[in-house]
Amino acid sequence: MGADLSSTTSRQALMQELEEAMRRSSAQGVMYGQAVANMAGISNSDMECMDILHLEGRVTAGRLAEVTGLTTGAITGVVDRLEKAGYVRRERDESDRRKVFISVVEEKAAEIGKFYVPMQEAMLKLWSSYTDDELHLLLRFANDGYKGVLEATGALKAVIDMPPEQRASLRMPPKTRR
Amino acid sequence: MGADLSSTTSRQALMQELEEAMRRSSAQGVMYGQAVANMAGISNSDMECMDILHLEGRVTAGRLAEVTGLTTGAITGVVDRLEKAGYVRRERDESDRRKVFISVVEEKAAEIGKFYVPMQEAMLKLWSSYTDDELHLLLRFANDGYKGVLEATGALKAVIDMPPEQRASLRMPPKTRR
DNA sequence: GCCTAATATCTTATGTACTAAGATAATTAG
DNA sequence: CTAATTATCTTAGTACATAAGATATTAGGC
């Protein structure tokens, strides 16, 4: 557990502060992303798919559904919009003609990239104030953090398997009327 | 993952790696939040408002609209849903009866809190592997990061004032009529 | 006090993006 | 060749958002 260098209390407070700071900056990051999507005139999901396309390159519609957690029907809509706006192209796989590969139209996508310039500059400025060793620590933190959140996402499913009398009250009736 | 500590190139690569790691973990964090909202049976906006209520305490409907960026009409819907599900209560301000304060029903809201336990445990575990000094560095980083993103969000508005021939293609058709 | 303007929330009409279920089309297995 | 499987698209219905305006309350000028 803790490398308890000074008092336990202050360390606890430190962690609390850290949690809040992380939450704040993360929330602001989400806002930035939404602002970019807005300016580009596409939805959040559309933007998320563009992100995935950049990271993974040419992917199938099914893969997008898998990663985003959206239904294949929703992905059809996403790709329709992105294709119509000129950001991506549909390309049938010639060896398996059921599959549809989605690929980015780089020249057009670069227009979106412009909106990320302020963010990239801010991050660069921020990071340049750290030593290599400090950056390594941050990298380790980010990687461990990712693993931690993944782990927590898995553990979250276990929470649903808790005493049923509690669970019942948490559930929302999926059928609603207006 | 070899680290070349000396050359500028490796520092550049380090930053690139850091950017990607941050992006991944942040995206995963968003996913976690969505999963929690899903399990609690409320929408993302509903959850965001619950968050704000926890941070700011008893706030008016108008304040929620202001912070979330949603219209007041949308907030009416959010509060309707949350109230119906028992998470919040509407309370008219007696000194200005136009205003409606929204306050959390703590006993009910605690049920949502349960879903955050896995995340909190993961973070606690993660942070306990760092020294106090390291945590201070991380805190500084998170705070500076927040400021950086805020700054970038401001700068983003300036990007819209770029050559109009580019902007036109980016704009969303506001094709609503009434 | 009364009329007008301003403020805070809610209502209505409408549009977008989602899901669920199933249709369509291509591939694989028996 | 037929049946099962896989990948995407289509259709019908729902949720949640906006825009504009309705409603209710408060505040200001006379």
Image: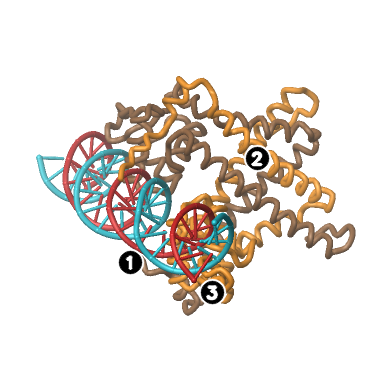
Chain colours: A brown, B orange, C red, D cyan
* Along the line of sight, the residue nearer the viewer: A104 or B97: B97
Q: Tell me the residue that label 2 is attached to.
A: B149
Q: Quadrant of residue D28?
A: bottom right
- Residue B57 vertical placement versus A67 (above, below): below
Q: Gap in Å between the C-alphas at discs 1 and 3? A: 21 Å
Which quadrant is home to the N terminus of chain A? bottom right
Q: Nearer the viewer, residue C9 or B9?
A: C9
Callout 3 crowding tier (Cα within 10 Å): few <14, some 14–19, many ≥20: some
Q: Secondary structure at mark 3?
A: helix
Q: Secondary structure at mark 1?
A: loop
What kind of residue is marked 2? Val
Q: Nearer the viewer, residue A26 or B53?
A: B53
At 79% from the left and 62% from the top, the residue drawn is A12
Locate residue B94, reporting x and y percent: 56, 74
Q: Are marks 1 and 3 in contact (CB under 8 Å)?
A: no
Amino acid type of the residue tagged 1 in the rendering: Thr
Residue on which the image places disc 1:
A176
Q: Are marks 2 and 3 in contact (CB under 8 Å)?
A: no
Per the image, the residue denoted by label 3 is: B108
The residue sitting at 60% across, 40% down in the picture is: B23
Tell me if mark 2 has few (under 14), some (14-19) or many (20+) residues whose alpha carbon lies within 10 angstroms of its own: many
User: On the picture, is B171 further left or further right than B56?
Assistant: left
